[in-house]
């Protein structure tokens, strides 16, 4: 059982994700996490002003429960199923990130510069996290889905729109990492 | 109530998988977009390969849900512009935050509080889309 405390290799994780999608389909639901953001807008009363948020959000409660489970899963994974929280990325990636100013690359789970509690006092980090949130929220809804909804669910159902969306995901990601990162970090 | 419990359990399984697979790590997302590791491609690729087999089998053999109901896959509406532009915008955010909408929740549970900023603004971003929807090309 020691393997469970080690980082899970891709050939365990990928099939687990497929299994999770299978379970949701068998419960008559679908796998897609970004719809929760729309549901949260509706719960906050966005439907009063905007047509897009006028829907029966109570029918989406099940997905909020899945998201709540994902929070609990994160807690269990980090507190009970991990010996250390180090992500062993490619040494080449580590030296690149060191040059960009990410000193913890190869030694931590998330970069201190963006995810340590001290960033609440750092305007630049707060700005970066805020902008990324805006892009994620706006982009997923514009594209009608995120990684789970398009790259896993949509492509599994051989949907061309999902392929277009996933190509978009990668264009955006590649532009960000290769062209915008050197400007902001 | 039993159903709610199962959804919670599925979510927990998902959260643990996201955390333990390191798909919730900013570093893994950076590494993926730099093509410096097979890890993320292995995860997405194997999930997708099995996913295609699962979905196509359910369709072909008309497998019923756990509640003995028909399973319907709703086809995505046709289009290019919204999927491409929306996808690019999401990709920019995905790489910057190193998290997509699933792992965001996982990281919150793992105790990385600054992810709350990302979650909060992703709700704002979704709201902005809803407001601007009719003015955007689709």
Image: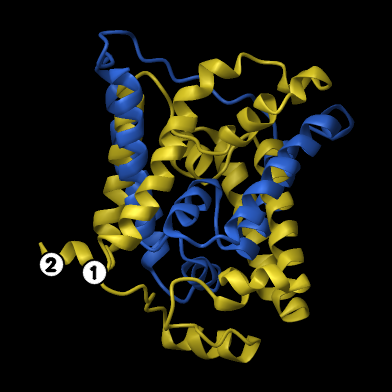
Q: Is residue B52 visible?
A: no
The quarter of the rendered structure image containing the C terminus of chain A is bottom right
> Both on one chain, marks 1 and 2?
yes
Circles 1 and 2, Cβ within 8 Å, touching? The answer is yes
Instruction: Classify residue A158 as left or right of residue A54.
Output: left
On the image, which quarter does residue A142 sit in? top right
User: Which residue, given by chain and number where applicable, does mark 1 sit on?
Assistant: A6
Position of A102 relative to A23 (above/below): below
> What residue is shown at x 37% (from left), y 66% (from top)?
B39
Position of A30 relative to A86 (above/below): above
| Chain B drawing hue | blue
Q: Chain of mark 1?
A: A
Q: Chain of mark 2?
A: A
Mark 2 closeness class: few <14, some 14–19, many ≥20 residues within 10 Å: few
> What residue is shown at x 44% (from left), y 33% (from top)?
A31
Judging depth in this view, the residue of B41 and A106 nearest the camera is A106
User: Which residue, given by chain and number where applicable, does mark 2 sit on?
Assistant: A2
In the image, farthest residue toward the top:
B69
Residue A82 location, x and y as percent? 27, 66
On the image, which quarter does residue A114 sit in? bottom right
Colour yellow belongs to chain = A
């Amino acid at each position: 059982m020691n393997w469970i405390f080690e980082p899970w290799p891709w050939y365990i994780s990928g099939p687990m994700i497929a299994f999770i999608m299978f379970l949701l389909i068998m419960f008559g639901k679908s796998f897609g996490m970004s719809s929760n953001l729309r549901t949260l807008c509706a719960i906050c009363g966005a439907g009063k002003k905007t047509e897009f948020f006028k829907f029966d959000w109570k029918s989406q409660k099940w997905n909020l429960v899945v998201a709540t489970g994902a929070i609990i899963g994160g807690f269990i994974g980090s507190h009970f199923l991990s010996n250390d929280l180090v992500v062993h990325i490619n040494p080449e990636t580590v030296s690149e990130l060191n040059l960009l100013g990410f000193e913890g690359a190869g030694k931590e789970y998330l970069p201190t510069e963006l995810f340590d509690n001290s960033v609440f006092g750092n305007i630049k980090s707060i700005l970066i996290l805020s902008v990324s949130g805006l892009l994620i929220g706006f982009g997923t809804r514009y594209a009608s889905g995120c990684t789970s909804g398009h790259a896993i669910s949509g492509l599994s159902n051989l949907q061309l729109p999902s392929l277009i969306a996933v190509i978009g995901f990668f264009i955006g990601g590649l532009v960000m990492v290769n062209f915008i990162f050197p400007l902001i970090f | 109530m039993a159903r709610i419990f199962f959804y919670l359990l599925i979510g927990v399984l998902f959260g643990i998988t996201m955390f333990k697979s390191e798909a919730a790590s900013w570093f893994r997302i950076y590494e993926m977009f730099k093509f410096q590791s097979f890890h993320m491609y292995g995860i997405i690729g194997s999930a997708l390969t099995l996913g295609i087999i699962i979905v196509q089998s359910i369709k072909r053999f008309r497998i019923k849900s756990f509640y003995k109901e028909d399973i319907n896959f709703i086809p995505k509406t046709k289009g290019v512009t919204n999927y491409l532009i929306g996808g690019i915008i999401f990709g920019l955010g995905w790489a910057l935050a190193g998290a997509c909408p699933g792992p965001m929740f996982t990281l919150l549970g793992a105790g990385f509080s600054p992810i709350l900023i990302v979650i909060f603004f992703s709700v704002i971003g979704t709201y902005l889309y809803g407001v601007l929807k009719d003015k955007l090309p689709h």
